[in-house]
């Protein structure tokens, strides 16, 4: 159905030409789903745009062909391509929040392509749109068809977008990270919807994603993309359970898995090569523990046991697993007997949103929505313990973390940090608490002041609390950098000169600078790629063991939380619905919401029922 | 929607009250003795004293303000200290002429400016776009009074097509009236076109790069549908606000343009009253300008709400 | 573990991007005009204020490059001297509006609540009157002089600067590094001036440079109306006003200062846009994910 052959795409950038795709060849047979997997910068979105003939102006196709059902897209006229796009190809983008036109109703957008490709009248198209919205599982399709995008939730929008892509009955659906912006439970629903649609309509799908768990559920075949090249290509079961290319191995080993607790995760060192001047040999060699002399040669795609692998050593390293680091310190003694370092009782916080006034008859009425992100929360965190806090977006996780640290003032309730009651104190009397309790943020680009060097960033908290003399300062900064495993010359760097993972290390070092006993980790790895995420998670585990510091580890990624936490708390609509030992929560959840949440998580090592036997899942 | 308008109107009244205080405050607080200003620096003290009492200048400032404001509200705008004429009729006449001038300019600016902006955005990076961009740089850089001089030089002095200045009532003949209107209008249009076309261009370019336009292209919609139905509606939203702002600038622009073309409107009245220290006229005139400006903003807000569903409805499906 | 950083420490400086063409042209134009004006007293070919009835209305020629005016004074020399006044007025006004507007905007954007409401409603009131009329109002009752014009123009643009500063501050105040500063009990003073301001100045610098052109145009308009520089010294606005009566007889007297002003304003605009392009982080990430 879709056949991409030897496609090379370059972008013109200010820093020179950048080869986003190098000789990509993939094909999706009719009625199957091909997944394209890769981390950020791998070039996977470019494939989607190229397949649709929608590459931006600064992109240039250097060579190769894109064929759809036997027709060469490159040889078509602009007008022919346009006709094909609307009638036989459908595209679903990553972010449901910006791909719907804010000033048109949902119904008119869903049915739109029918008017221009199938000769419907606007009225007929709108009627058909209602039918399509019904088909994608929207409960009150008529009301939704008349609504505007801003009135719908993210999941509803994504359903509407899928409905719009399906309207002209396309043969091929291209989905670019269709669930990445959504919560897990919504993600599960959308995936289910896609499965149904595929079965019902015999769709061919090109599914682009970084999430291997999702890919396992939807794809028949997987192609793994690294630095603009396909490095492994084969049946989903084969690639995900018995990866042959070292990068695929590393990527799979780096994923934390629920139910198989390891002390440390495997991680992939280094970073993507600069695609403005790609290495002449294997593009992964620099980061590969299996690299050998042959890696300096350009690698070609070879068929090994029914799948394509771009690695000369594939057979040699087939049975060797990716190396997993050891824990550097022995685990601290059982934590249960120790006194809590943080203790929260009946904490409440309410926000008032939308202060406007409306006229009701002649009386003025305040329009207020009350939002209660922290609703009667009670919890303890013991010394050296990791309490994982999970919940979906809007559940109040972040607000709770910041309220405990008094970055947001609570309405009522008690917060005790160490032996100090901090909930009633005015901000200026919180110095002692601020030293004891610190925070690590989600977005390393936003959490470091871009105008300060790493040295300045780390020295400031030390100076602020008078923890070292001016002469001792460089030594202390070096110690901190060493603690997060950054070389000491990084003290002179500015944030923009570092990678995401390195920035997050600096963020952790800054939190450690005050020698805290408790750190709120607010989604510290969510902005990072899987391979980098693993290294940061390991670092946090090491620091806990070395320093005995306790974490409130906030994350929407249950896999990461399961890996790191001693105990887990589950939040929904501002309330704590369940809290308990990690194993108990993960294996025997009791609250219905916890059960729903856990079953929605796409797991990479789960097996589809149809699959035959194979070696046991990776440990 | 009614609530929205009510809220806006209420806010406008508040702002106008505040502006009236500001206007009154500045003229009253600045270190200048109004009586001396009127009578000249060598006036005998007893005359000055008499005039101060006549004008109520010896009362506390808030009393003066209340007196001024309450007479203003009853429609009595007071008397011009210079011409000893009631301000009301004088002002109405001037406002009418000025609105004629600004109205004509505004329509031309909106049509030509928005049109140029869209065309340039659609040809982004092409020669036409560069042409428009260079043109707008020039347009922004040339002050109105210089445009006026160029217009006079070209159309009056060299070509002799238009009168260099003055005003004739429509009763003198439509063409004569129109002829006197053309030169100041052209000046205002030249002076203000650039802002609007520049903003339209950049907002149109931004919208054309937005994900929902790419999505519309991915649906294989014909290009004119993509541009007219998907891009234009959203691109024009910021332009509406900009046009209201520009109407405000036009109200400022008439000060210079009417002075140069000796066009007897609001702008010339203001300059005239300043040159002759006619404070009551000045205060009234500036307040009228603020009111017109506020009305323009209200219209813009309503239009904005009309075209932006996020404001139009407060409801929530789902 | 530590391997993530140890193997490849790519020294990733931001790609060396050349200066945008606009910036170069803008610098050249602005620099030349400012320099010529600064050096005016030493390079002016003739005295700027010597009245001579014999040399009235001479068209541009080898002795008087830009001709002479109705009092027989050299237009070029007056142009150079006038440039000093116009530029000084524009700069002065901008500095006034920055000095007041930036702290206002910082406070409004950071403290929010009633501080924000009060300051912004105040700005609304000032913005309810077109700038030139506000300027006229301020200048109405005091004898005109150039520094007062600069002050008045600066005053008029305070609300705009305050608004822009506020919106920049609002964005920055949401950044996580501000929360990090609060998490170590930094004072509001430290956060405003050491964390926010260093990040706010690039967009403010761009804005200020464009604001200088507004100030020059508004100031010259006020001068043109007789509320700025007073004869015999004259800035470009007043030069044009004085030349107005002779526009058909001696157009060069008006055209010279008019064109000079255009070149200066275009230069500064190009400079500002060029700076914006260099500093605007959105443009850097425009190509973003692929």
Image (cartoon, rainbow, N blue to C red):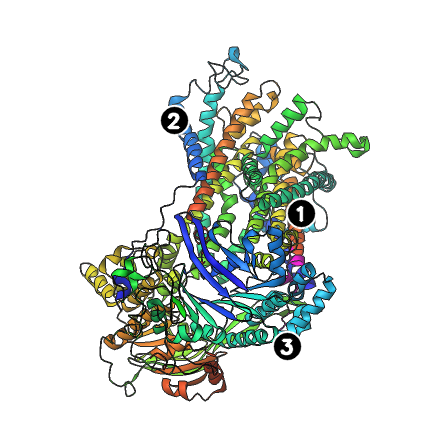
Who is closer to the viewer here, A459 or C19? Answer: C19
Bounds of the magenta segment: B304-318
Which residue is rendered at x = 28% and y = 88% of the image?
Answer: A337
Do tags 1 and 3 sit on the same chain? no
Separation of residues labelled 1 and 3 (CA atoms):
49 Å
Q: Position of residue B132 (x, y in %)?
A: 57, 39
Q: Chain of mark 3?
A: A
Q: Position of residue A10 (x, y in %)?
A: 44, 51
Q: Which residue is mark 1?
A: B292
Q: Which residue is mark 3?
A: A139
Where residue C185 sits, quadrant-wise, is bottom left
Q: Is residue C48 above or below residue B213?
A: above
Q: Marks 2 and 1: CB-CB under 8 Å?
A: no
Left-right relation of C159 to C247:
left
Q: Is residue C243 above or below residue B137?
A: above
Circle 2 Cα neighbour tier, 10 Å, few/some/many (<14 / 14–19 / ≥20):
some
């Amino acid at each position: 159905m879709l056949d991409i052959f030897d496609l090379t795409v370059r972008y013109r950038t200010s820093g020179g030409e950048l080869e986003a795709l190098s000789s990509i060849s993939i094909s999706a047979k009719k009625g199957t789903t091909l997944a394209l997997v890769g981390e950020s910068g791998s070039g996977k979105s470019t494939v989607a745009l190229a397949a649709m003939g929608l590459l931006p102006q600064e992109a240039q196709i250097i060579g190769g062909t894109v064929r759809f059902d036997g027709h060469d897209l490159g040889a078509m006229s602009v007008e022919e391509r346009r006709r094909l796009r609307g009638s036989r190809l459908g595209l679903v983008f990553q972010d449901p929040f910006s791909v719907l036109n804010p000033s048109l109703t949902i119904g008119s957008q869903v049915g739109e392509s029918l008017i221009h490709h199938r000769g419907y009248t606007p009225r007929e198209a709108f009627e058909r749109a209602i039918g399509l919205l019904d088909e994608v599982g929207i409960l009150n399709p008529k009301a939704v068809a008349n609504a505007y995008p801003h009135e719908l939730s993210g999941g509803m929008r994504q359903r509407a977008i899928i409905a719009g892509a399906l309207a002209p009955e396309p043969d091929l659906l291209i989905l670019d990270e269709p669930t990445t912006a959504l919560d897990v439970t919504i993600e599960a629903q959308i995936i289910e919807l896609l499965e149904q649609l595929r079965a019902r309509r015999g769709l061919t799908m090109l599914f682009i994603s970084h999430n291997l768990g999702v890919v396992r559920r939807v794809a028949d075949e997987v192609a793994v993309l690294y630095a603009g090249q396909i490095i492994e290509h084969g049946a989903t079961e084969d690639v995900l359970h018995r990866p042959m290319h070292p990068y695929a191995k590393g990527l799979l080993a780096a994923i934390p898995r629920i139910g198989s607790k390891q002390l440390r995760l495997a991680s992939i060192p280094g970073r993507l090569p600069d695609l403005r001047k790609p290495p002449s040999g294997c593009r992964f060699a620099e980061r590969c523990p299996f690299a050998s002399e042959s890696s300096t040669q350009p690698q070609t795609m070879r068929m090994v046991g029914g799948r394509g692998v771009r690695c000369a050593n594939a057979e040699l390293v087939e049975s060797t697993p990716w190396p997993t680091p050891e824990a550097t310190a022995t685990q601290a003694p059982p934590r249960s007997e120790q006194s809590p370092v943080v203790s929260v009782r009946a904490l409440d916080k309410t926000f008032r949103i939308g202060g406007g006034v409306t006229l009701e008859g002649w009386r003025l009425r305040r329009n207020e929505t009350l939002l209660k992100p922290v609703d009667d929360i009670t919890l303890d965190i013991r010394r050296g313990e990791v309490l994982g806090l999970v919940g979906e977006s809007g559940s109040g996780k972040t607000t709770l973390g910041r309220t405990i640290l008094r970055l947001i003032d609570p309405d009522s309730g008690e917060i005790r940090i160490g032996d100090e009651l901090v909930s009633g104190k005015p901000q200026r009397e919180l110095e002692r608490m601020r030293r004891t309790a610190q925070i690590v943020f989600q977005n390393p680009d936003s959490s470091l002041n871009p105008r300060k060097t790493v040295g300045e960033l780390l020295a400031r908290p030390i100076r602020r609390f008078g923890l070292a003399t001016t002469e001792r300062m460089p030594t202390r900064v070096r110690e901190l950098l060493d603690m997060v495993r950054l070389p000491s010359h990084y003290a002179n760097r500015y944030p923009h000169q570092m990678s995401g993972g390195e920035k997050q290390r600096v963020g952790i070092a800054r939190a450690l600078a005050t020698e805290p006993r408790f750190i709120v980790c607010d989604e510290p790895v969510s902005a990072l790629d899987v391979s980098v995420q693993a290294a940061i998670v390991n670092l946090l585990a090491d620091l806990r063991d070395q320093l005995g510091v306790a974490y409130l580890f906030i994350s929407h990624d249950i896999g990461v939380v399961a890996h790191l936490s001693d105990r887990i708390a589950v939040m929904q609509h501002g309330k704590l619905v369940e809290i308990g030992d990690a194993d108990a929560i993960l294996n025997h959840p009791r609250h219905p919401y916890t059960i729903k949440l856990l079953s929605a998580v796409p797991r990479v090592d789960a097996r589809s029922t149809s699959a035959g036997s194979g070696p046991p899942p990776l440990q | 929607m009614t609530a929205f308008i009510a809220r806006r109107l209420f806010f406008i009244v508040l702002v106008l009250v505040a502006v009236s205080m500001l206007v009154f405050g500045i003229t009253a607080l600045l270190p200048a003795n109004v009586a001396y200003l009127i009578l000249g620096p060598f006036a005998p003290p007893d005359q000055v004293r008499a005039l101060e009492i006549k004008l109520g200048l010896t009362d506390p400032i808030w009393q003066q303000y209340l007196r001024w404001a309450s007479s203003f509200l009853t429609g009595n705008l007071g008397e011009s200290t210079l011409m000893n004429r009631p301000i009301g009729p004088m002002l109405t006449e001037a406002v009418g002429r000025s609105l004629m001038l600004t109205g004509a300019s505004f329509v031309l600016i909106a049509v030509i400016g928005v049109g140029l902006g869209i065309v340039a955005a659609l040809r982004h990076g092409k020669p036409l776009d560069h042409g428009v961009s260079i043109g707008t740089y020039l347009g922004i850089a040339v002050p109105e009074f210089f445009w006026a001089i160029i217009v006079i030089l070209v159309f009056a002095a060299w070509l002799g097509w238009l009168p260099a200045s003055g005003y004739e009532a429509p009763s003198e003949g439509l063409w004569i009236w129109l002829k006197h209107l053309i030169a100041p209008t052209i000046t205002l249009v030249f002076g203000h076109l650039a802002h609007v076309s520049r903003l339209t261009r950049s907002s149109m370019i931004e919208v054309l790069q937005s994900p929902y336009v790419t999505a519309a292209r991915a649906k294989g919609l014909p290009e004119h549908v993509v541009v007219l139905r998907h891009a234009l509606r959203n691109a024009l939203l910021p332009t509406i606000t900009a046009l209201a702002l520009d109407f405000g600038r036009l109200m400022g622009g008439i000060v210079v343009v009417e002075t140069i073309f000796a066009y007897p409107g609001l702008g010339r009245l203001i300059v005239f009253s300043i040159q002759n220290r006619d404070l009551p006229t000045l205060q009234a005139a500036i307040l009228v300008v603020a009111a017109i400006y506020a009305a323009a903003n209200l219209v813009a807000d309503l239009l904005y709400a009309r075209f932006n569903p996020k404001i139009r409805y407060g409801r929530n499906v789902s | 573990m530590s391997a993530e950083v140890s193997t490849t420490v790519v020294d990733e400086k931001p790609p060396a991007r050349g200066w945008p063409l606009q910036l170069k042209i803008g610098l050249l134009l602005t620099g030349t005009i400012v320099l010529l004006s600064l050096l005016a007293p030493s390079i002016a070919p003739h005295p700027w204020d010597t009245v001579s009835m014999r040399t009235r209305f001479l068209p541009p020629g080898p002795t008087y490059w830009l001709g002479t005016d109705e009092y027989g004074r050299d237009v070029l020399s007056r142009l150079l001297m006038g440039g000093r006044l116009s530029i000084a007025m524009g700069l002065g006004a901008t500095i006034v509006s920055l000095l007041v507007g930036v702290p206002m905007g910082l406070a409004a954007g950071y403290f929010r609540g009633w501080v924000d409401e009060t300051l912004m409603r105040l700005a609304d009131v000032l913005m309810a009157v077109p700038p030139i009329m506000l300027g006229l109002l301020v200048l109405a009752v005091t004898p005109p002089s150039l520094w007062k014009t600069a002050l008045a123009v600066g005053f008029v643009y305070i609300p705009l600067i305050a608004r822009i500063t506020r919106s920049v501050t609002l964005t920055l105040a949401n950044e996580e590094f501000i929360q990090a500063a609060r998490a170590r009990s930094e004072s509001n003073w430290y956060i405003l001036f050491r964390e926010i301001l260093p990040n706010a100045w690039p967009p403010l610098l761009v804005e200020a440079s464009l604001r200088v052109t507004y100030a020059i145009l508004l100031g010259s308009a006020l001068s043109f109306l007789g509320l700025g520089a007073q004869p015999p010294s004259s800035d470009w606005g007043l030069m044009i006003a004085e030349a107005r009566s002779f526009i058909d007889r001696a157009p060069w007297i008006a055209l010279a200062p008019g064109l000079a002003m255009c070149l200066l304003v275009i230069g500064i605009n190009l400079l500002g846009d060029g700076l914006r392009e260099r500093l605007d982080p959105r443009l850097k990430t425009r190509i973003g994910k692929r």
